[in-house]
Amino acid sequence: MAAENSNPFDLIIVGAGMYACGKGTNGYGTILPAAFEAFRRGWIKTIHIAAATKKSADLAKEKAIQLKDLTKVSPELHFYPKKDDDPHAYLCAVEKADRPCAGIISVPDNLHFEITKALIQKKIHVQVVKPLVSTADENNRLIELKNQYGIYGCVEYHKRFDESNLKLYDLIRQGALGELLHFRINYSQRKLIPTTVFRNWVETTNVFQYLGVHYVDLIQFLTDAKPLRVMSMGMKKYLSSQGIHTYDTIQTLIEWQQDEGKGCFFSSHLTGWVDPNVSTAMSDQRLEVIGTRGRYRSDQKSRGVTLVTDDHGCEEINPYFCQFFQDIDGQALRINGYGPESILQFIDDCVNITNGKKSPAELQGLRASFESSLCIAMVLEASAKSLAEGNIWICVNKSSANS
Ligand SMILES: NC(=O)c1ccc[n+]([C@@H]2O[C@H](COP(=O)([O-])OP(=O)(O)OC[C@H]3O[C@@H](n4cnc5c(N)ncnc54)[C@H](O)[C@@H]3O)[C@@H](O)[C@H]2O)c1
């Protein structure tokens, strides 16, 4: 980790929604607080936040003012669009930002390709929130483009930074679980996500693409396996009754092929977004791995911290994802957790690139890259095809034959 940066650079955040700034919540999202922490560490100077509407830009400004007060750091901030609504306001941020600079893209999934492409063409290193894109063709085009421009590109898959998953990473590599047989994932969120937070764009994605991808990436990360075939089944009951045309739940089976004669294993992913809004956490998530010599179970919702209040009822808090804690002097709040850590890692990597200490090609290891996202895009494509074609198995390679 960079102790300091003698040449702090500008950071552009494209998108000012829930994940970027905490829009529609009492919080501040994950990206903006991480950017404040990067500023506190002296890694970046000016922060540019580009939304598509003036209203979103104003809301981001309000959140930023509150964050300055909480964290006692005061980066210079610019918000776009400045006057009228403009889906291309991020290009004004790109023009205004000093070079070198880095960009974090957190817009609806169907805009990831276009905006990532535009930033790379302006020679800006990028981190894109998951999923990078949902087709192998777009994924391949972004890999080519970033290589052509010599740009560093990565994907914000923060579950790779969760220590409960890093423990599993080592156990699998040490062979402690024996030969892998099954992964079983349950991951669901509250109804308010599809009905309120994402109402504008919920029908352009689905719940497997929104939630399931986290664990598709994680399984690939943990095992180095390649997906062979995919089958998905979906149910439409609650959301369609509300006039929202998407699945309530999707159940997906993936067969994976490991290297070096280690054979195959299966993963099953039950994803949903119709949990009651009074559930004790936004995300309910559990992971179980069964091998020939052991079993690993990780409750990623119930982390052992429960709060009950008159105002909010019972809440199960994940203190490890993204929380504010008092700094050692008790004077200000600091952001902490595996969510901001994955963003700070990207900014730290950009510090090393801009100071000439590392090249984009050297930044591999445990990082989620555009290359590692390719098999996720293939799984998403295969899953969509399976849903459209009566829940049949779709061979991953065949489904992306034109890639
Ligand atoms: N990694 C995670 O845990 C996580 C969590 C939530 C969301 N996400 C991802 O983050 C992305 C955004 O999700 P969200 O929850 O913030 O959604 P959201 O609907 O709250 O926010 C999307 C924002 O994008 C902005 N936007 C739309 N078009 C734009 C454009 N042309 N230029 C600039 N901004 C534009 C809008 O201002 C809107 O506020 C999605 O891809 C989602 O899958 C990731």
Image (cartoon, helix red, strand yellow):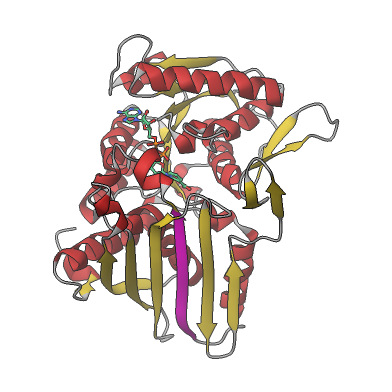
Residue situated furthest right in the rendering:
329
Q: Can you see residue 271?
A: yes
Q: Quadrant of residue 229?
A: bottom left
Q: Is residue 397 left or right of residue 185?
A: left
Please provide percent x and percent y for residue 207. 34, 56
Q: Nearer the viewer, residue 20 or 156?
A: 20
Seen at 55% across and 36% down, the residue is: 347
Q: Is residue 191 magenta?
A: no
Q: Quadrant of residue 87?
A: top left
Q: Is residue 181 magenta?
A: yes
Seen at 23% across and 60% down, the residue is: 381
**Residue 336 against residue 274 in the figure, above or below:** above
Quadrant showing the C terminus: bottom left
Q: Nearer the viewer, residue 371 or 75?
A: 75
Quadrant showing the N terminus: top right
Seen at 36% across and 55% down, the residue is: 373
Residue range in magenta is: 180-189
Residue situated furthest bottom in the rendering:
292
**Residue 391 against residue 61 in the figure, above or below:** below
